[in-house]
Image (spheres, rainbow, N blue to C red):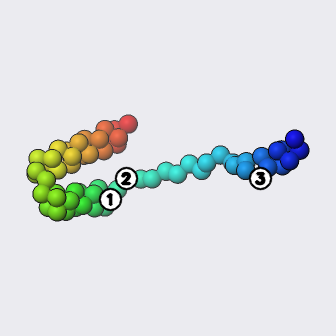
Amino acid sequence: MNWYAEIRKRFRTSEPAVVYAEECDEITDEIEKSLWEIKDSLDLPTEEIEISLASRKKALQWKLKS
């Protein structure tokens, strides 16, 4: 079983690194622009995009309060 222990050593991984990302207005603006482009290209109802944007803004406000 010595070969098994040797192979296990090779594939041991350390803990994954934690990455923190900040939500900024530029990212939100780009997401909003992209949603409007998708709406135009796929001919989606305007209400769907407005609901998505309102939901995203509400989630961001909730996140900032926490």
The reply to whether residue 61 is in sight is no
Q: Which circle marks residue 23 in the picture? A: 2
Question: Position of 6 compared to 54: left or right?
Answer: right
Q: Which circle marks residue 10 in the picture? A: 3
Q: Pinpoint residue 8: horizontal percent, then vertical percent.
A: 77, 46
Q: Pinpoint residue 65: horizontal percent, then vertical percent.
A: 34, 38
Which residue is rendered at x = 17% and y = 44% of the image?
51
Give the amino acid at mark 1: Ile
Q: Pinpoint residue 5: horizontal percent, then vertical percent.
A: 83, 44
Which residue is rendered at x = 17% and y = 63% of the image?
41
Decide which of tag 1 and tag 3 comes sooner along the chain.
3
Give the labeled residue for mark 1: 27
Give the amino acid at mark 2: Glu
Q: Quadrant of residue 25?
A: bottom left
Helix, strand or loop at label 1? It is helix
Q: Is 38 above or below relative to 14?
A: below
Give the amino acid at mark 3: Arg
